[in-house]
Amino acid sequence: MPIRVTIWNEFIHERENDAVRAIYPDGIHAAIAAALASADDVAVWCATLGETEHGLAAERLAATDVLIWWGHRAHAQVADAVVGRVAQRVWEGMGLIVLHSGHFSKIFKRLMGTPCALRWREAGERERLWTINPSHPITQGVGAAIELPNSEMYGEPFLVPEPLETVFVSWFEGGEVFRSGLTYRRGAGHIFYFAPGHETYPIYHHPAVQTVLRNAVRWAYNPAPAWTAVSLAPNRPIAEAPEPIEAKGAALHRPGEAGFR
Amino acid sequence: MPIRVTIWNEFIHERENDAVRAIYPDGIHAAIAAALASADDVAVWCATLGETEHGLAAERLAATDVLIWWGHRAHAQVADAVVGRVAQRVWEGMGLIVLHSGHFSKIFKRLMGTPCALRWREAGERERLWTINPSHPITQGVGAAIELPNSEMYGEPFLVPEPLETVFVSWFEGGEVFRSGLTYRRGAGHIFYFAPGHETYPIYHHPAVQTVLRNAVRWAYNPAPAWTAVSLAPNRPIAEAPEPIEAKGAALHRPGEAGFR
Amino acid sequence: MPIRVTIWNEFIHERENDAVRAIYPDGIHAAIAAALASADDVAVWCATLGETEHGLAAERLAATDVLIWWGHRAHAQVADAVVGRVAQRVWEGMGLIVLHSGHFSKIFKRLMGTPCALRWREAGERERLWTINPSHPITQGVGAAIELPNSEMYGEPFLVPEPLETVFVSWFEGGEVFRSGLTYRRGAGHIFYFAPGHETYPIYHHPAVQTVLRNAVRWAYNPAPAWTAVSLAPNRPIAEAPEPIEAKGAALHRPGEAGFR
Amino acid sequence: MPIRVTIWNEFIHERENDAVRAIYPDGIHAAIAAALASADDVAVWCATLGETEHGLAAERLAATDVLIWWGHRAHAQVADAVVGRVAQRVWEGMGLIVLHSGHFSKIFKRLMGTPCALRWREAGERERLWTINPSHPITQGVGAAIELPNSEMYGEPFLVPEPLETVFVSWFEGGEVFRSGLTYRRGAGHIFYFAPGHETYPIYHHPAVQTVLRNAVRWAYNPAPAWTAVSLAPNRPIAEAPEPIEAKGAALHRPGEAGFR
């Protein structure tokens, strides 16, 4: 069975801005889908902000192994209920790949627990992503560095927790650096933040960026069964303790009563 | 200047449950305050759920170096606005010590980005906290282990991110284990989760637990100036780039325009 | 192509101690090989201390994807040259699974950079390994815990660096705990330390332990090409800098000269 | 009592190379000592390769709270016995600050467990160290970045384990990046690797670099008592188990016998 990928895109700038539409006439999601089309082991769906429930109904998420997220202008318009549902699915094991301006998305901030702030400059300057971890599944086939002739500068400090792995670090023509590829785990979910992707440059048409996206999908996929109980805090009755014990002292809860939340 | 500590307590069970009141007649916060009283370098305030803004107005948080959090039954009653304010202060550098059932508090879940779930059993069984990191500031003076004659069992899996440091791991009479002392960083804020503290046992009267609390306050204190801009994403104008560059290609933003959030 | 596994065993106690021989008549390596036999995607070799170069000649290591290490009594007899060769192969991408008393092996200490000390007691007591990370590839199929009726106690503090992931934590009948499943990365090599395996108990005949071994082999396997240059520090000539620069100031090295080591 | 710092310097290039001597007429150690002189809470010793036991006799190390290491050309001349002694002291709690070309020192490689390789270019190019973690004790007072007009390029991949914290990342004029400030823990010892310091440029005369050195000394200092037993693996006799148990099954060791190493 292929890896089931849902590409979520805000899909606003491509419809409203001529420069962006010229690069992504069918939307950024379509360009990412095209990048994944060469992967035989991947099946792709797309979803956008304007659809009912932003295209992320419970059934769609339940059938998603890896979610790719691109948003920029309308983070605040994403319904909190949808964000909560996506977070739960990540904890259950759905992979999540957050792209570029998605650093400020509700879902990324919720999963990181930090502001996810950074510095930025829109000058079309050169960016070079250095491969910090050449043996990582995400960097296979990209070589020592990825060179982007035009990019938006994202600069440190990047307000995220220390990552599980630093995969890429970027050099910018204007003098800054940025940790542009970082991995995290939250519950059973593998998360990859990948910085490139400003919509006024054709970054998702770059072959090495497309290779990273394909690699990241495979890396983020967790084949373990969905951990649907991941958020529950079950009581372990005294009678079922691994070692025989008897109750001592006072108790707040009656036997079988649920815990407080 | 002393470390300014605010002890926040839900303060419900001590008023409503006879067994709890017998142990903590003035509230758990009062017992923790007493534990900190022997530290010359610490000044203590207390705040409870029932106060205006739960006792955590902006001025109080601005004057707090380390916040200690005890909640259990009323997590849902804590206003989201207060939670957001506390999170911002942690990112700015306020230390946070989350105790026992605080694992399910809104603030801890927000800062961890995970469900923070666990398994539990209220049997008054023996718990032994093993010092995993005897050279850590938090474990100074507690020896190889802390023995609690009666405790609530908290069992793995504990749904938190991999910690910065594992400081304590607990053994339970009934057969379970738990990572009962974990550290994290979120922005400039140092966070310590410490599992002991069930309100039907006199755990905060235990000398070694009190030593941990005093140590943790000092560890969590970050003397760096408050990073009030930690959540901002400032534009770096082209003219101020560290290396001279000129704008190339299309741009979404006009010069000086704020970024999207 | 299958994953090529070499099982290395000291193979002393099974020949010299009747109790051990009764459990592992053909050696611990044979029991581990039998555990891996049900994995269609694995091909197994064995190597022992007494062989030429301890059975770990350069050709054997070059043809090994994952090395499993069991040693206890004769750590000091392992030649430093062989240890250096194994370390280099781990950095190049060979997986390494270190079992039980291998915590004090030269290779584990070299790769950890710490003393790898612990506390121990040989009482045949009950050990229960709790699954801390149920969504990890190594824990698939083992359930919430593995129960060993008889085991050697290994107790904290365990003098290793903070791990990449804590996979198992053990509870012992006598009252201790131990982080009994830990992962690390060193260069391109994935390392798993797994604590069970004392030779006077039939631990490697336990089905769940065998499942862990099979899982760990697959997890430790890095399909990336061997990173044979991992230890080299190549000069990047000025003429080949990604950005055009000219030499400024004094230099220690003449053009093309190798660096110091 | 002040923090007792020993500055270790190979002290070869300053005596043999005119360009280096012009910058550091009394040796790099003297320049670092001068940088620390403004810190009232620090007492400084110096030691060099040419002294007996390289100036690192057991008594000297026992009286050292933080060791600073600068070596380049003569890593191989450092005696293994001295390296082992330094490693033991780090595990016991002595802080270690490894500078620049010390990435290839025996002590750093032993503590990291990796090759510690990197890419390099000696072109006197501009380096800008970005502060990744502005709230870290090591970065206090240095601002957003440190600019070095002339530096040796050190480039990724840098073959070290994932760090505890990434403190600085460097931008180079020639197009590369480097994680130039990284922290680690090994046993009770705090380790800071700081990349700047090529001997043909006056880097240790730079005020912000000196600030980092002073900060790093304070950060690396562990006030806990020296953990002299850190490498021992004591037996825990059955009679002294925290929970009463009786021996079951076979045993390798007689009561009181030492473990194998």
Image (tube, coloured by chain):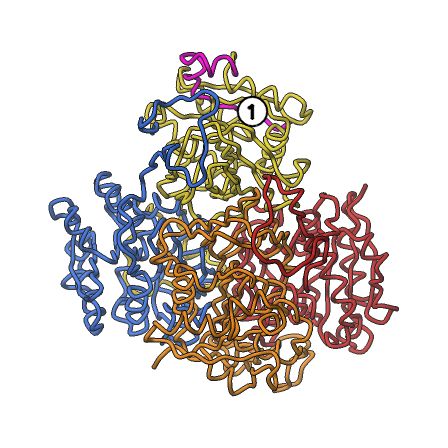
Chain colours: A yellow, B blue, C red, D orange
Q: Nearer the viewer, residue C62 or B55?
A: C62
- In the rendered structure, the residue with mark 1 lies on which chain? A
Residue D58 locus on image (x, y percent): 55, 86
Along the line of sight, the residue nearer the viewer: D94 or A173: A173
- Amino acid marked by disc 1: Tyr
Which stretch is magenta?
A2-23
> In the displayed image of the protein, which residue is found farthest to the right?
C52
Number of numbered discs visible in the structure rendering: 1
Q: How many neighbours does mark 1 have within 10 angstroms: few (below 14), some (14-19), or many (20 or more)?
A: many
User: Would you place residue C101 above or below residue B81 in this image?
Assistant: below
- Residue at screen point 74% across, 67% down: C83
Give x and y (percent) for residue C81.
Answer: 78, 69
Q: Position of residue A101 (x, y in %)?
A: 43, 30
Please determine whether, in this image, residue C123 is positioned above or below residue B126.
Answer: below
Q: Quadrant of the N terminus of chain A?
A: top right
Q: Mark 1 — residue?
A: A204
Q: Is residue B108 left or right of residue D154?
A: left
Question: Image quadrant for the C terminus of chain A?
Answer: top left
The answer to which quarter of the image holds residue A247 is: bottom left
| Residue B128 in view | no
- Please, what secondary structure does the residue beneath circle 1 have? helix
